[in-house]
Image (tube, helix red, strand yellow):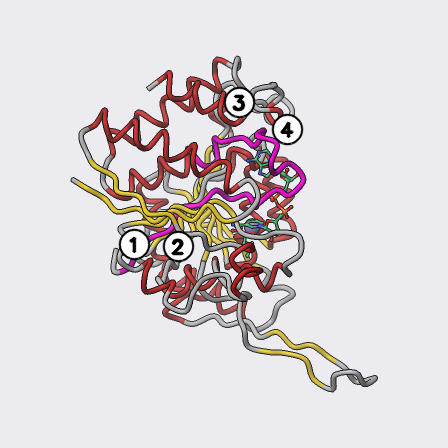
Amino acid sequence: MSYRIALIPGDGIGQEVIPEGVRVLQALAGDFGFALEFAEFPYSCQHYLDHGAMMPPDGIEQLSRFDAIFLGAVGAPGVADHVSLWGLLVPIRREFDQYVNLRPVKLLPGVRSPLADRKPEEIDFLVVRENTEGEYSTIGGRVFEGTEREAVLQQSVFTRHGVDRILRYAFEAAKARRGKLASATKSNGIIHTMPYWDERVAAMAKHYPQVEVSQFHIDILTAHFVQHPDWFDVVVGSNLFGDILSDLGPACAGGIGIAPSANLNPEKRFPSMFEPVHGSAPDIAGQGIANPIATLWTAQMMLDFLGEARAAAALMGAIEAVCAEGKTLTRDLGGTASTREMTDAVLAKL
Ligand code: NAD
Ligand code: IPM
Ligand code: MN
């Protein structure tokens, strides 16, 4: 098989970790007998500063010809975050209907959780985040600007189609795992959208008698992530709740330097996009010290989704081996290795 991959390193450490991901992918392609054709796109904040847009008008059309998109991070000081993100990352998720944002949280052997005494088998869950609607919406704006009555309105959008499809995905994932689903809600405080979300969860649950369903308000759910991470198997949340949970979850499992993510169009009508959870990390960009594991694990998710399960399993094994050995770790994991050295260690295990 041959796959066409669009590379968007983007900004900051995105420029440092994507090339490492490519090195590892190329090695795997050689070992497992498939071909990868990469094309790099300079879409980034620099592109914005040079051309006035994060990507050209036909950017989405160009990307649509690929089997997958492998993206680093977007965002740089000097360009407002809502401009950069809504000019590149968010449009890709929406135009390609990548409605599932899948973010595994797993404590790898050898990685120390900041939660005292937690062992790998106690932190292993999947955050399933709605990725195309919800609280992330362009509907709204400023009224009575500059007056005493100035106000800003932001409309959330929860469609039956949008809610049901993410719930169905999450229930299916729970069925395939340990059969437990936790839903993030806030129906005590947000009186329209969240009671509706709960209602759809209850309706979907009827089709999955084998899945044990629980629901938690988002405030206490964050506390449970810290105090009882072992309770969770699959956690489903709206766009914003899922966003928050998918930084908190990895923080409990050793930090966002290792957290992977996949933006999926499960039906494969459009390319899916694979990107680490973390951002462009301007505070460490350019130093060659970013942890490459988030990106390598993301590459593993991409291989799995493309159908290269054996290569994906080999890569996961190599990532786990390097963490377990604990000799070549970046600073965020307590070591002194550079981005390149840690990637080399993974390559050596393949
Ligand atoms: P961030 O993830 O970039 O950084 C948060 C902290 O984590 C920083 O201290 C950083 O050094 C550290 N960190 C992140 N990745 C790391 C890695 N691989 N190895 C070691 N340490 C790592 O989040 P932020 O500071 O909130 O955002 C910075 C910029 O990135 C903003 O412009 C933001 O909008 C953008 N952002 C983009 C994405 C994305 O492209 N998917 C995601 C989150 C944030
Ligand atoms: C993420 C990021 C993005 C999000 C931002 C940068 C728009 O935080 O991928 O989690 O909120 O989805
Ligand atoms: Mn986020």
Report crowding for label 2: few under 14, some 14 to 19, many 20 or more residues within 10 A (C-alpha): many
Q: Residue at x 51, y 42 (%)?
A: 14
Q: Is residue 115 left or right of residue 328?
A: right
Q: Position of residue 180 (x, y in %)?
A: 41, 43
Q: Which residues are magenta?
A: 270-295
Query: Which residue carries the number 1 mark?
Result: 266
Query: Image height check: is 211 above or below 254?
Result: below
Magenta stretch: dominant secondary structure: loop
Disc 1/disc 2 C-alpha distance (Å): 8 Å
Q: Which mark is residue 100?
A: 2
Marks 4/1: CA distance? Answer: 34 Å
Mark 1 or mark 2: name the one nearer the start of the chain: 2
Q: Are there few (<14), some (14-19), or many (20+) residues within 10 Å of tag 1?
A: some
Q: Amino acid at mark 4?
A: Leu
* Residue visible at 30% across and 57% down in the picture: 207
Give whichever of discs 4 and 1 has the lower sequence position: 4
Dividing the picture into quadrants, the one containing residue 249 is top right
Label 1 element class: loop
Taking depth in this image into account, of 255 and 190 the one nearest to the observer is 255
Q: Which residue is mark 4?
A: 115
102 falls in the magenta region: no
Q: CA distance from mark 2 to mark 4?
A: 28 Å
Q: Please tell me how crowded label 4 is: few (under 14), some (14-19), or many (20+) other residues with Cα within 10 Å.
A: some
Split into 4 quadrants, where in the image is the C terminus? Answer: top left
Residue sitting at 61 percent across and 21 percent down? 117
Residue 3, given in percent of the width and then of the height, sits at: 23, 44
The amino acid marked with disc number 1 is Pro
Name the spot of residue 204 as percent of width and height, x first.
Answer: 36, 60
